Image: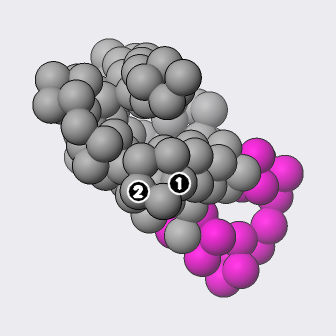
Amino acid sequence: MIDYINIAMAIFSIVLGLVGWLKPGYTMNTLDLKTGNSVMGISEIRAASGALFVGLGLGAMFLGSAHAYAMIGFAWGGASIGRLTSIILDGATRKKWVFFLCEIAVGIILISINLL
């Protein structure tokens, strides 16, 4: 059962990463981000919200170890810490809470089933 959860979470990361990587405009719109005079925002979305998560998911599936799947959990958990920081310092919104809950859930699930 753990193997199925690991693979499902890795695929979830890959799919969301593909959207960020290949559809940065859609991702930026979803995140309420705007492009300006620079294309660095699009580049950052493709890299940090996109291909990074594709690489995490594919890498974990390639390695197939509990530690590799736990690393996906640590990445999502790290994102949740950043999101919670934003909720506290920048103000809470419904969208931020939804993203936070998703990020913390993936993080807790993958860390707990692979390391605890």
Range drawn in magenta: 82-99
Q: How far, Cα to Cα, is label 2 from label 1?
A: 6 Å
**In screen coordinates, is 109 left or right of 61?**
right
Residue 73 falls within the magenta-colored stretch: no
State which quarter of the image contains the N terminus.
Answer: top right
Quickly name the residue at label 1.
112
Q: Answer with the quarter of the image where residue 63 lies.
A: top left
Residue 5: percent from the left, percent from the top? 52, 26
Give neighbour class at mark 2: few <14, some 14-19, many 20+ (Cα, 10 Å).
Answer: few
Seen at 71% across and 80% down, the residue is 88
Q: How would you classify the magenta stretch by its main secondary structure?
A: helix
Residue 71: percent from the left, percent from the top? 31, 51
Residue 89: percent from the left, percent from the top? 66, 83
**In screen coordinates, is 102 left or right of 81?**
right
Q: Residue furthest right?
A: 94
**In screen coordinates, is 52 left or right of 63?**
right
